[in-house]
Image (cartoon, helix red, strand yellow):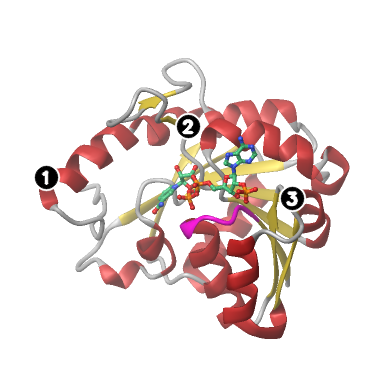
Amino acid sequence: MKIGILGTGMVGDAIGTKLVQLGHEVKMGSRSVNNEKAAAWVKKNGRHALQGTFADAAAFGEIVFNCTSGMASLDVLRMAGADNLKGKILIDVANPLDFSKGMPPSLSVCNTDSLGEQLQRAFPETKVVKTLNTMNCQVMINPSLVKGEHDVFVSGDDADAKAKVISILKDWFGWKSVIDLGDIKTARGVEMLLPFWITLRGQLQTGTFNFKIAQ
Ligand SMILES: NC(=O)c1ccc[n+]([C@@H]2O[C@H](COP(=O)([O-])OP(=O)(O)OC[C@H]3O[C@@H](n4cnc5c(N)ncnc54)[C@H](OP(=O)(O)O)[C@@H]3O)[C@@H](O)[C@H]2O)c1
């Protein structure tokens, strides 16, 4: 498939690399067409790895990943362009973390709203599916890094889009347990897990862990 990645940070790099390794063509988008991090990623990943602006990546992708700073994601999607995202699945892995007052970050939206909902409201013709935001980016694409059974969550309004994303999580990334939380409103809960995740990372002294829901 042709896949657009919005974001040149470690998450865009990790997901983009995995997708190229799986044989997909991937375009990484940035504010600038010749972003240095994207250029380094292209160099590392060969001819199926491309770079461009956010709009270039969104237009290129049959599916688009949002791997941008949560505080900037709405602006990024506006730069990507509603027409370029129309009718497409947007896999939203971003967290609305506000680092403006230092560590630990707070959430710029929570309780009665979420970044996932903000994106879905602003781009109603795009199918936003929130997932993969509750673990680090190496675990996202290689869940076997964490021993035993553990879970990834999905939230979204469009049932077909969620089914497609669940198959991507299982067949491409190797997830065994995917919990469908419901509509995009359920993104509130998984985004609000982040302060807890950050505390755990500090206490465990590693980012290689995940949540397991026991019944
Ligand atoms: N790190 C992890 O393991 C992890 C795990 C789960 C979820 N997440 C979430 O995944 C997302 C990506 O994380 P990351 O660490 O890879 O990258 P990041 O540093 O949070 O974001 C980098 C991207 O955001 C864009 N950006 C930043 N400020 C912007 C602004 N003012 N206007 C427009 N674009 C702006 C950058 O654009 P340019 O390319 O133009 O510089 C870049 O593409 C975040 O929301 C994070 O919370 C991260």
Residue 32: which numbered mark, if any? none
SS at badge 3: helix
Q: Residue at x 41, y 17 (%)?
A: 111
Does the magenta run of residues contain 119? Answer: no
* Pointer 2 residue Cβ closer than 8 Å to ligand 1: yes
Which portion, as a residue range, is magenta?
Answer: 6-10
- For the residues labelled 3 and 2, the Cα–Cα distance comes to 19 Å
Q: Is residue 97 left or right of residue 68?
A: left
Query: Main SS of the magenta segment?
Result: loop
* Pointer 3 residue Cβ closer than 8 Å to ligand 1: yes
The amino acid beneath tag 3 is Phe
- For the residues labelled 1 and 3, the Cα–Cα distance comes to 36 Å
Crowd class of label 2 (few under 14; some 14 to 19; many from 20; radius 10 Å): many
Whether residue 22 is visible to the viewer of this picture, yes or no, is no
Q: Is residue 206 left or right of residue 86?
A: left
Mark 3 vs mark 2, foreground winner is: 3
The amino acid beneath tag 2 is Pro
Name the residue carrying label 1: 203
Q: Residue at x 66, y 48 (%)?
A: 90
Whether residue 91 is visible to the viewer of this picture, yes or no, is yes
SS at badge 2: loop
The amino acid beneath tag 1 is Gln
Residue 96: which numbered mark, if any? 2
Going from N to C along the chain, the mark reached first, 1 or 2, is 2
Q: Position of residue 160 (x, y in %)?
A: 67, 51
SS at badge 1: helix
Q: Position of residue 171 (x, y in %)?
A: 52, 73
Q: Is residue 8 left or right of residue 190?
A: right
Name the residue carrying label 3: 54
Q: Is residue 182 above or below residue 149?
A: above
Going from N to C along the chain, the mark reached first, 3 or 2, is 3
